[in-house]
Structure formats: C-alpha cells, structure tokens
Amino acid sequence: MIKNSFIYRSRYIFSILIILLLLSATIIPENPLYNLNWALLSTLIVFLGILAFFWQFEKKQMNSKMIALIATMSSLAAVSRIAFSAIVSLQPATFIIMITGYVFGAQIGFMVGAIAALVSNFFLGQGPWTPWQMFCWGMCGALASMLSLKQAGFRLLSFAVLAGLCGFFYGWVINIWHWAAFMYPLNIKTFLAVYASSLVFDGIHAVGNVVFSLLFAGTFYTILCRFKKYI
Amino acid sequence: MLTYNSKDNLIFKLHPFTQMTFIGIVFILALVFSHPIYLLVLLMSVWVVIAAAGNLAEWKGYMKFSIVMVLFIVAINTLFARAGTTIIYRGPEIPLIGSLEISLEAIAYGLGMSVRLLVIISIFCLYTYAVNPDKALRLFSKMGGKSVLAITLSVRLFPLMMKDFQRISGIQRCRGVKLATGSWWERARNSIPIISIMLLSCMERSLQLAESMYARGYGSGPRSCYEKDLWRPRDYIILILTTIAMAVGIWSAVKGWSAFSYYPVLEQVDPLELIGAAITALALLVPAILNWGWMKWPILKSRI
C-alpha cells in the first residue's frame, strides 16, 4: 500500500513537471518551442490529459457490461443535451455525467463525459472546442466520483453544490482556450474581460445543474445503484 | 440524423486517413500562420474545397453563427489593446478599462484573428459534413479497441434514443402532461417522468447490449475485420501534396514570412514573402482540382 501510494505520488509529480516544462519552454527564449502559439499548446496539453484517461481505460480489464454501460450513458447525456434544451432551454448533460461518475467511479465517469461530448458533436458539429468539452465533461464526472469517496451514500445538498461549481468550472476551463486563441495582448486585463463576458452563460449553466440535481438526483441515484448490482 | 451525408464526389470518396490528414494540416497551418494574407489564402482554399464537396449551404450556416464571435473578438481587441500607435479615436475615461483608445492596429489584429477563426470553423465544417464518423473512428481502432467500440456504439445509439425521447414525450402529451405550455418550472417538473423513463429504458438496453456482445463472443479472441477501406492513387496524390503544403508552411514560418507584426505599426507587405502562401494554396487546392477533373472526364475517374 505504501509503495503503491509512492508510485502514484511520483507519477503525479512527474506529470505536473512535464506540463510545467512545456509551459516554461514557450517563455524561455532561444529554444525551438519559444513563442509557440498558446492556443495550440493548451489544446495539446488538454489532448494529452484526455489521452492519459483513455490509455488507462484501455489497460484496464473491462467486460462487455461496462462497455455497454459507458456507451448507453454517454448516448443518454448526448441526447439530453439536444432534446431537453427544447423543453426547458437548459441541458442536463453535465448532471447526468456527474451522477454516473458519482455512482460508478472516476474512470467510467470520465469516459462517459468525454464520449458524450464527442458523440453529441458528431450531430451538432465538431470544432476546436471538442477536446475542451471532452476534457471538461470528463473532469466533471471524475470530480463527482471524488465527492462520493468522501461521503457514504448520497447527500443531495453537497452533490447540488458540486454540480453548481462544475457549471462554473466547465466555462472557466473552456475560457482559457478562448483567451489564448483570440485575444491580444495576452494579459490579465483581456483574461478578466473574457471571464466577465462568459459569466452569464456560466451562471445559467450552474443554475441549471443545481435545478437538475434537485429534481432528478434522488431518482437517478436509486436507478443507477440498482443497476450497479448487475455489473 | 447524422450530419454526414454521403455524396458522389471525390472529396467524399477519399480514404478517411487522407481526409483527416488534409483537415489536420489546414488546422495546424491556421494556428501557425499569423500573416493576414497567408490566412486569407488558406480560407480561400478551404472554401474552394468545401464548394467542391458540395457543402456550401451548410458552410454558410456556420459563417452566420461565427459572425457574432468575430464581432466579439474585434470588439474586445480594440477595447483592450494598447500597443497600437495609429490612434483613430480617443474617447473619454471609462472605469476598469482606462481611457478609451481605438487604434488601427488593434482593429487590424482583431480582423486577422477573425480570419483565423473562420479558417478553423470552416475546416471543422468540412470535417463535420464530409467525414464519415464510423470510418474516421475505425482508423483508431488498432490503438484502442475498447474506447473506439464504446464511441461507435454510442454514435449508433444516439438516433435510437432520440426516437425513444420523441415516443415517450408523445405518450406523455397524449396523457395530458403539458410540455410545451405552462411556466418554466411546470415544464421542468413535467419532464421528470420522461427523463426517468428514458434512464430506465437506457439501462435495460445497456444490459441487452452487453448480453448480445457476450453471446457473440466479445473479447474471446483477436478482433476480426468487417470492412476495409481501399487505398487509391488519389489518396497518394493528395497525401503527398498536402504534406508539401505543410512543409512549405512550416518553412515559411521558420523563415518568418508567414509572421506579421501588427504592433506598434502595421508591417509593410513584401510581395516576395507571399511565395509561401501561393505554394501552400496551390497544394491545398489539389483535391478541388482533382474533383473537377473527376466530374469532367470519366477516364480520370476510372484511373484515380
């Protein structure tokens, strides 16, 4: 156990070092990466993050039930992204991903989030935002699973609070790309301007997440827990 | 349901790897270039290829939606950039921002970045409409069998669930549940049964899917191949030429030709530096030219 945690910690430090190295390479002059486009670099880092999760998933022994579960849940999240916005002009996709992550763990939560973003974009249109959406939704699923490790059973209040925070988290991560790709000069003023201009959208997303958690979380949790016994 | 719709022209009949390479190279070049003429030329060649693929109508829809983003980018850049020297308008003091200064350079920079955004949006429009998602995913199935299987299954389930959703909400309406009228909170509450029924049927479906996979012997041995994509001469021609475009693009970036300094004063354009743009554009136009030949001469169509 001690050895295991040592390996995990060193891996953790190692990956942070790689990211810092990549970032610092662009501000230290006289090397081939100097002044590399930040939009490209940030997308690359996000892409590596997604790849790491997918790679872990490939290495793990998976049975057909888990693969079928991931496929159907991500499809449900993708459908809800389109279908429900017609009824209440909010999308419960983030909530569905989070409750899946809460019940089934970080790996399945991340995969469902990432695949939901990818698949719904096959129908809505792919773009440079796809890897960012994949990453953000995947992380929402992973964050929810972390909450489930902290508390036994299901507590609506803490889940709803986390869902609201995830609404902001989602927008704030995607804003990084928007800022790096289209703003000049890249300074704190333009950074804050981008964040201020997205505040309303993020707020709506967060409120929607809280509302969906209050409305659906109890039912979803019972249904998913019942299904978990089959796997 | 899927945005991809098969069409009978060369762009649609390419190997998915060739299509993905073309799209990837244009995307990278759009981020590498900052010279407005290089970016405009890139936009033009993508536009011609989209026209050759017959997706201009969809592309126009994309452009309408990106105009808003373009306005936003230009506005933020002109308001916040302070490095320009050719000041067009000097306004009053505004809290948070400071004194209002609008410079020609900032507007030019905003427009240049907008062209970059348009190139990126156009190339993703081409990807959305011209690349078959199943074939594109199949390229990665060697690397990651399980995740690609999950993605493909999910793409396949999507239309099915959309139908489920319409069926369930139709039944609810027949029973008098109001989904289209009433206050926002009422509609939200009325949609609870729909979403929980959908979740239940989705869980049921997932179990059936897993049983069916098990019955077909999923994971019992090495995977077999259902369908193979053929490599044809056209793929080699286009692959070689897009690689040349990439090489020329990178080379002119290294030489500093494709860079453009907006600040403090707009740079003078040296016509000699535009050679890189011309070669890149010609190489990237090849799919459209080949498509034109393919439509015109049956003999070329049978050869490539």
Image (cartoon, coloured by chain):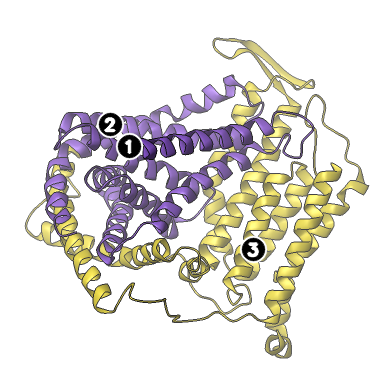
Chain colours: A purple, B yellow
Nearer to us in this view, A84 or A152: A152
Chain for disc number 1: A
**Residue beneath disc 2:** A162
Figure quadrant of the N terminus of chain A:
top left
> Is residue A165 toward the left or the right of residue A18 in the image?
left
Nearer to us in this view, B43 or B216: B216
> Is residue B195 toward the left or the right of residue B43 in the image?
left
Q: Are marks 3 and 1 in contact (CB under 8 Å)?
A: no
Precedes in sequence: disc 2 or disc 1: 1
> Is residue A210 toward the left or the right of residue A200 in the image?
left
Q: Residue at x 73, y 64 (%)?
A: B242
Q: Residue type at mark 1: give it.
A: Leu
Helix, strand or loop under label 1: helix
Nearer to us in this view, A10 or A114: A10
Q: Residue at x 63, y 76 (%)?
A: B10
Mark 2 packing: few (<14 Cα in 10 Å), some, or many (20+)?
many
Say whether residue B293 is visible.
yes
Name, please, the residue furthest toward the left: B175
Q: Residue type at mark 2: give it.
A: Leu
**Residue beneath disc 3:** B21
Chain for disc number 2: A
Q: Residue at x 55, y 58 (%)?
A: B125
Helix, strand or loop under label 3: helix
Say whether residue A182 is visible.
no
> Which label was assigned to residue B201?
none
Mark whose residue sits in front, 2 or 1 = 1
Distance CA(mark 2)–CA(mark 3): 40 Å
